[in-house]
Image (cartoon, rainbow, N blue to C red):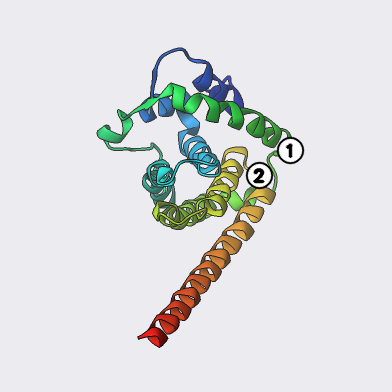
Amino acid sequence: MANQSLSDVIAGFGEDTRPVLTVGQMLEQFDSRAFGAMLFVFGLLNCLPLPPGSSTLLSLPILLLAPQVAWGADVPWLPRRLKDYPLKRDDLRGLFRKLTPIVRRMELVTRPRLEILFGPAGERLIGLTCTLLALVLVLPIPLGNLAPGATVAVLSLALLQRDGLLALLGYLMAAASVGLLVLSASVVMAAIDKLLHVFSGLF
C-alpha cells in the first residue's frame, strides 16, 4: 500500500482472479492506512445501489473500526470471524470497477491542507462522527444509506489525505444527513398518524 495509491489497491481487488476476498485481506493490502482506507471503501460501497439489507452487512466494518479511531487506537482490530468472512469476488468486481474511477478523481482534487484539524482530537472527532453515521447505516431504512455512506467516505478520505477543507465539508454533510434523517422520520410519523385517523374513521 505504501507504494500504491488507494485507487490502485481498490482496482487490484477487482482484477485479482481468486474467487474469494476477505476483509482481513483488505486490511493487509491497505497496510498502515487501514483505518481511513477501510472506512472510505465501505462508506462508498454504501452509496451504491445495492439489494435490500446490504447496507447492514457493509456497515459492520465501519461500526467496528470508527469507534477505534475515536478511541485513538493505532492498529485496527476486527473479530476473527468478520476478518475471515468470505466475500465472493464476482459479486464485488463490478462495484470495485465503479469505485476506482471515482477514487481516482477524488485523489486528484485532495491534498494536505488545514492540517491543524488532524491532531489527536481532530482524528477522534472524525472517528466519533463516523461511528454515529454507522449506527444509521445499520438500520434498514430505504435509501437511508446514501447520505451517511457518502459522509463517511468524505471524512475518511479527508483523514487519509490530511485534507482539512474536505473534513469541513464532511462535517457539513454529517449535519445535513442528520437533518434528512429527522425530516424523513417526521414525514413517516405524520403519514402513520394520518393513516390511523383514516382507519379510525372507518370503524
Task: Determine crowd level at label 1: few under 14, some 14-19, many 20+ residues with C-alpha closer than 10 A.
Answer: few
CA gap, disc 1 and disc 2: 10 Å
* Residue at figure coordinates x 46%, y 38% from the top left: 35
User: Is residue 5 positioned above or below 133 on the image?
Assistant: above
- Which three-letter amino acid code belongs to the residue tagged 1? Val
- Which three-letter amino acid code belongs to the residue tagged 2? Asp
Q: Earlier in the sequence, mark 1 or mark 2?
A: 1
34 vs 192, nearest the viewer:
192
108 vs 44, nearest the viewer:
44
Q: Quadrant of residue 89?
A: top left
* Residue on which disc 2 sits: 163
* Residue 46 in sight here: yes
Mark 2 element type: loop
* Residue at figure coordinates x 49%, y 77% from the top left: 190
* Residue at figure coordinates x 57%, y 64% from the top left: 180
Q: In the orientation shown, which residue stands out farthest toward the top?
A: 17
> Which quarter of the rendering shows the C terminus?
bottom left
Label of residue 109 in the image: 1
Count of labels in the image: 2
Where residue 138 appears, as percent x and y from the top left, is: 39, 52
Q: Quadrant of residue 48?
A: top right
- Labels 1 and 2 touching (C-beta < 8 A): no
Between circles 1 and 2, the one closer to the viewer is 1
* Residue 5 in sight here: no
Mark 1 element type: helix
In-image side of 138 versus 191 (left or right): left
54 vs 38, nearest the viewer:
54
Where residue 55 appears, as percent x and y from the top left, is: 44, 45
Task: Determine crowd level at label 2: few under 14, some 14-19, many 20+ residues with C-alpha closer than 10 A.
Answer: many
Where residue 150 appears, as percent x and y from the top left, is: 58, 48
Label of residue 170 in the image: none
